[in-house]
Image (tube, rainbow, N blue to C red):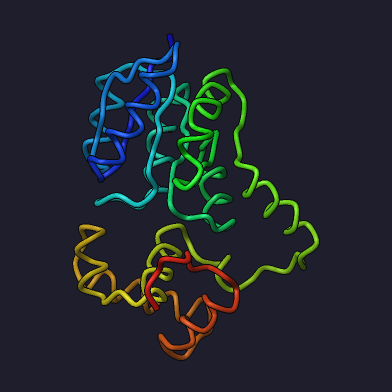
Amino acid sequence: MIRVLIADDHALVRDGLRHILQNASGFEVVGEACDSATTIALVRSHPAEVLVLDLSMPGRNGVELIRQVKDELPALRILVLTMHAEQQYAVRAFKAGASGYLTKESASAELVSAVTKVASGGVYVSLAMAERFAQSLNEPTDTLPHQRLSDREFDVFRRIAAGQTLTQIAAELCVSSKTVSTYKTRILEKMQMPHEAALVRYAVRHKLLADDDEI
């Protein structure tokens, strides 16, 4: 029996994932969390083999959360389940310690296979993401401006490019507006961009926004 933890801030998504796994043989959902703080408490108190983790929850940046979970519980396998289909997110998630990356649009069809593969010690990447990785092999190896950003800076950069205000970003990340403003300044400096409009153009040009992101 594979014990699974689910962390997603949408109750409907958690219900759907639980339903899929409980209708398949060999899985037991032993706990759920709705934000980064409860996710940390959950993994500490509920032994499991796999954590199915949404990257975009209130609190800590998703990639930072992966790193913390792996630091505390190296044996716990993490399957990222996210709306972000961009390669850059997947790369950062795997570098932080994730063992699988699955987009929500393909979750119902692939979830059981992905959890099984990850629990057995393997690595799972959806077909669409694997194709993106393969295509990237032909891209120039020079470091692009957005690749100079830390995980948190990259997250803030995408939120700014998607049209969120500093106040909105601060509320979603549970930090002060002043902190977000500091991140914005660093991002502009590291990427050598003059203003927010340039960040938006860059994000669009490099396809760093999801289809449903607002710009």
Give the quarter of the image for residue 70. top left
In the depicted view, which residue is nearer to us: 130 or 139? 130
Left or right, residue 185 beside residue 140: left
Residue depicted at x 40% and y 29%: 51
Residue depicted at x 48% and y 27%: 77
In the depicted view, which residue is nearer to us: 53 or 196? 53
Q: Which corner quadrant holds the C terminus? A: bottom left
Residue depicted at x 32% and y 20%: 29
Above/below status of 192 relative to 124: below
Above/below status of 52 relative to 133: above
Left or right, residue 29 beside residue 206: left
- The x and y percentages for residue 178 are 22, 73
In the depicted view, which residue is nearer to us: 104 or 132? 104
Left or right, residue 140 beside residue 31: right
Question: Which residue is situated farthest in the bottom direction here?
Answer: 194
Q: Which corner quadrant holds the N terminus? A: top left
Above/below status of 185 relative to 75: below
Residue depicted at x 19% and y 63%: 171
- The x and y percentages for residue 48 are 37, 18
- The x and y percentages for residue 65 are 37, 43
- The x and y percentages for residue 172 are 24, 60
Give the quarter of the image for residue 7. top left
Question: Which residue is situated farthest in the right direction here?
Answer: 138
What count of labels does the image hold? 0
